[in-house]
C-alpha cells in the first residue's frame, strides 16, 4: 500500500510539472494522498513534505513553470 501511495504521489508531481496552471487542483489531490499515508500510520518522506510546502508558497509558480519534464 505504501509503495502504491508513493507511486500515486510521483504521478501527481509529474502532472503538476506538466500542467503548472492546474497546480492548485493537483495540489489538493497531493494533500489527500499525504493524509492517506498518515492515516495508514506511515511517515511521509521529507522530500514529499518539502514539495507540499513549496506548493503552498505563492512564489512557487516560477519553480513549477521552469521545472523540466
Image: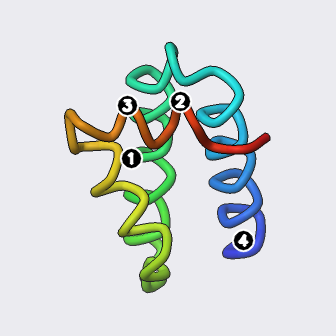
Please rate how many residues cluster around mark 4, counting C-alpha atoms within 10 Å: few if below 14, some from 14 to 19, many from 20: few
Question: Which mark is drawn over residue 1?
Answer: 4
Determine contact: label 2, label 4, CB under 8 Å: no
Determine contact: label 2, label 3, CB under 8 Å: yes
Please rate how many residues cluster around mark 2, counting C-alpha atoms within 10 Å: few if below 14, some from 14 to 19, many from 20: some
Foreground: 5 or 64? Answer: 64
Q: Locate the C terminus and report the quarter of the image it occupies.
A: top right
Q: For numbered disc 4, what is the local secondary structure?
A: loop
Distance of label 2 from label 3 (alpha carbons): 6 Å
Question: Which mark is drawn over residue 61?
Answer: 3
> In the image, which is nearer the foreground, mark 3 or mark 1?
3
- Residue 52 placement, left or right of 33: left
> In the image, which is nearer the foreground, mark 3 or mark 4?
3
Foreground: 52 or 37? Answer: 52
Pinpoint residue 17: horizontal percent, then vertical percent: 64, 36
Distance of label 2 from label 4 (alpha carbons): 31 Å
Instruction: Give the residue number, with chain letter if any, for mark 1.
Output: 31
Please rate how many residues cluster around mark 3, counting C-alpha atoms within 10 Å: few if below 14, some from 14 to 19, many from 20: some
Amino acid at each position: 500500500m505504501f509503495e502504491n501511495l508513493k507511486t500515486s504521489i510521483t504521478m501527481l508531481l509529474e502532472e503538476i510539472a506538466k500542467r503548472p496552471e492546474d497546480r492548485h487542483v493537483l495540489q489538493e489531490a497531493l494533500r489527500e494522498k499525504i493524509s492517506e499515508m498518515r492515516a495508514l500510520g506511515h511517515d511521509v518522506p521529507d522530500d514529499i513534505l518539502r514539495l507540499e510546502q513549496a506548493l503552498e508558497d505563492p512564489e512557487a509558480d516560477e519553480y513549477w513553470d521552469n521545472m523540466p519534464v
